[in-house]
Amino acid sequence: MAEMRVHRALAQAGVASRRAAEKLVQEGRVTVNGAVATIGQSVTETDVVEVDGRRVRAEPIRTYMLNKPMGVVSTASDPEGRRTVLDGLPDDVRLYPIGRLDIDTTGLLLITNDGDLAHRLMHPRSKVPKTYEALVEGRVSSAAVRALRNGIDLEDGPTQPAKVEVLDRQAAGGTWLRIEITEGRNRQVRRMCEAVGHRVRRLVRTRYGGLGLGGLDRGDHRLLSSAELVKLESQAGLAR
Ligand code: URA
């Protein structure tokens, strides 16, 4: 296993948030192989980490990018037995998706066992940009684009300003839009488009927090690179 800072290992093991774990280290309550841990000390799976004398087992942190296919649910398990986004991923650590995509939305979904990272990214305060490409019914007017940009009054409150671009007005089946939002409300893009009179026919998430799909094929997954993780953690306000 790769080395990680002891406070990160504690957060990963669910002992405390990274900040609170750092405090535990500062207070001298954490030991590594019997010696009091120091801030920033690195540990691996083979080290014995204890808090107040109790052994803590850390899983290796893993964060994957999945290019979600159609017809797959964004939950860890489905009572109806449908395929989930975790099918096909390694099951040696307890993974869950960072947020949700609708069953008929495709594209970029992050999946992790890093509770701290997931929590921060999903928090409304994080304002992580998410970019979608939507094929909507009909020809979209400039007034509708302006309305989407400025914010739409939905039943759960007005949406924050969004970046909206028309990609193709002549597409078969309607108009392709690119929409970047910083919130993550349920079915938000579909509801925004419907509110201006355009039902969404296809919805693809192409970017999340500055990360793109690159060449990842539909249905495939890969681990994030360390450069991608650094980018994401800084978006989430987490220092390494
Ligand atoms: N907005 C939606 O409407 N659906 C998604 O799956 C994601 C964002």
Image (cartoon, rainbow, N blue to C red):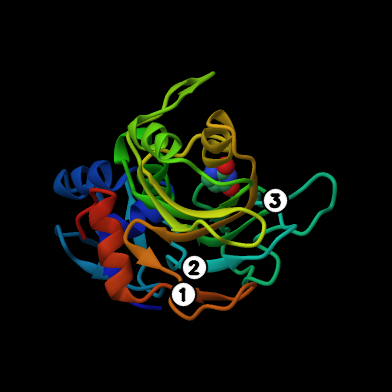
For label 1, count other residues whose C-alpha is less than 10 Å away and answer few (under 14), some (14-19) or many (20+): some
Q: In the image, ligand 1 is in what quadrant? A: top right
Secondary structure of residue under mark 2: strand
Percent position of residue 219, x then y: 65, 72
Viewer-proximal residue among 82 and 148:
148
Q: Is residue 45 above or below residue 160?
A: below
Q: Residue at x 19, y 43 (%)?
A: 23
Secondary structure of residue under mark 1: strand
Percent position of residue 152, x then y: 44, 27
Q: Residue at x 20, y 59 (%)?
A: 37
Q: Which residue is mark 3?
A: 103
Q: Are marks 2 and 1 in contact (CB under 8 Å)?
A: yes
The C terminus appears in which quarter of the rendering? Answer: bottom left
Q: Are marks 2 and 3 in contact (CB under 8 Å)?
A: no
Q: Which residue is mark 1?
A: 223
Callout in the foreground (2, 1): 2
Spatial CA distance of label 1 from label 3 is 22 Å
Give the side of residue 240 with respect to residue 218, left or right.
left
N-terminal-most mark, 1 or 3: 3
Q: Which residue is mark 2?
A: 65
Secondary structure of residue under mark 3: loop
Q: Residue at x 51, y 76 (%)?
A: 222
For label 3, count other residues whose C-alpha is less than 10 Å away and answer few (under 14), some (14-19) or many (20+): some
Q: Amino acid at mark 3?
A: Ile
Give the side of residue 110 with respect to residue 208, left or right.
right
N-terminal-most mark, 2 or 3: 2
